[in-house]
Image (tube, rainbow, N blue to C red):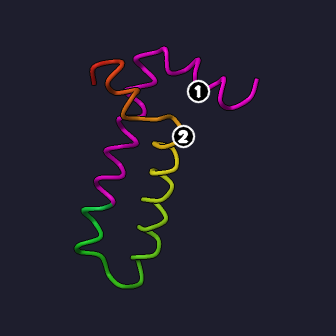
Amino acid sequence: MDITKSIETLSNYKEFAHFIKQVHFMREKAIANMFEAEPHTVQQISGQILGCDSVLKMVDSETLFTRHEI
């Protein structure tokens, strides 16, 4: 099974949508942390944001949230 089919299958489950919502919250928290971050940690936080963004885009999070009314 390829990743696209796996995501399609998982997207049928509300529990998966809740998990992805946690990834969304993690991204928002990382963005908030940027404002008070030390210069040497900005790159690390940016990486966290990019990682979360990648997951959210891969699973089409907005459609997933709408589908499960989250």
Residue 65 in the image: state x and y as whole percent: 34, 27
Residue 57: mark: none
Magenta stretch, main secondary structure, is helix
Judged left or right of residue 46, residue 33 is left
Residue occupying image coordinates x 36% and y 52%: 27
Q: Secondary structure at mark 2?
A: helix
Residue 4 in the image: state x and y as whole percent: 65, 30
Q: Secondary structure at mark 1?
A: helix
- Residue 64 magenta-drawn? no
Amino acid type, residue under disc 2 in the picture: Met
Pointers 2 and 1 in contact (CB under 8 A)?
yes
Residue position marked by numbered label 2 in the rendering:
58
Amino acid type, residue under disc 1 in the picture: Ile
Judged left or right of residue 65, residue 57 is right
Question: In terms of image quadrants, where is residue 19?
Answer: top left
Q: Which residues are magenta?
A: 1-30
- Residue 8 magenta-drawn? yes
Residue count near mark 2 (Cα–Cα under 10 Å), binned few <14, some 14–19, many ≥20:
few
Judged left or right of residue 70, residue 60 is right
Picture layout, residue 16 above or below residue 42 = above
Residue position marked by numbered label 1 in the rendering:
7
Q: Nearer the viewer, residue 9 or 39?
A: 9
Residue occupying image coordinates x 29% and y 70%: 34
**Quadrant location, the C terminus:** top left
